[in-house]
Image (cartoon, grey):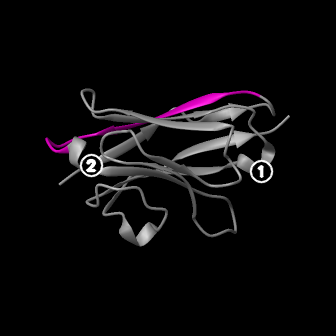
Amino acid sequence: QVQVVESGGGLVQPGDSLRLSCAASGRTFSSYAMGWFRQAPGKEREFVSAINWSGRSTIYADSVKGRFTISRDNAKKTMYLQMNSLKPEDTAVYYCAASYSPGTTDRPSQYDYWGQGTQVTVSS
C-alpha cells in the first residue's frame, strides 16, 4: 500500500513559479506510475501530468504543456511538479496519485491511491 502527501501549494501572482512535492510511503514507490490532477471550484477533477515508474516517460495536459514539468526521485520516494508562468486559471486544489500500472495514464480511474490535495492560488 502507498500513502501520498502533497506539499508546496500557496498563493502566488501570475507569472510566478511554484514547485509541488508528493512524498510517498511504502517500499515499492518505484513500481508505481504517478500523476498530478487538479480540481477548481465548481469543476471536475482534471488531469495535469503523469510520469512512469522510471521517470523516462511523461505526459501533460495541453493546458500546462511547456509550463509545467513533472519529475520523480525514487530514492527519496518523492514526485515533483515544477509549475512556471502560472496563470489565474491554474488555481485549483492539486492532487497527487499513484497507480499500480507502471506506465503513464491520464485516467483517474487508473489511479489507486490519492493524497488530500494542496491548494494553489494564482491571483494578483
In the rendered view, tell whether residue 112 sits above or below residue 96.
below
Residue 46 location in percent, x, y? 59, 63
SS at circle 2: loop
Q: Residue at x 78, y 41 (%)?
A: 87
Query: What's the amino acid at mark 2?
Result: Gln
Q: Which residue is at the far left?
A: 27
Residue 41 location in percent, x, y? 68, 62
Q: Residues within 10 Å of mark 1 (few under 14, many from 20)?
A: few
To which residue does mark 1 refer? 89
Question: From the image, which quarter does the N terminus lie in?
Answer: bottom left
SS at circle 1: helix
- In the picture, measured across the screen, residue 23 lies left or right of residue 17, that is left
Q: Residue at x 27, y 49 (%)?
A: 3
Closer to the N terminus: mark 1 or mark 2?
2
Residue 28 location in percent, x, y? 16, 45
Number of numbered callouts drawn: 2
Q: Quadrant of residue 29?
A: top left
Q: Quadrant of residue 77?
A: top left
In the rendered view, tell whether residue 108 sits above or below residue 62.
below
Q: Which disc number belongs to residue 70?
A: none
Q: Residue at x 86, y 34 (%)?
A: 124
Q: Which residue is at the far right?
A: 124
To which residue does mark 2 refer? 3
Q: Quadrant of residue 53?
A: top left
Q: Which residue is at the far front?
A: 56
Q: Which residues are magenta?
A: 16-28
Query: What's the amino acid at mark 1?
Result: Glu
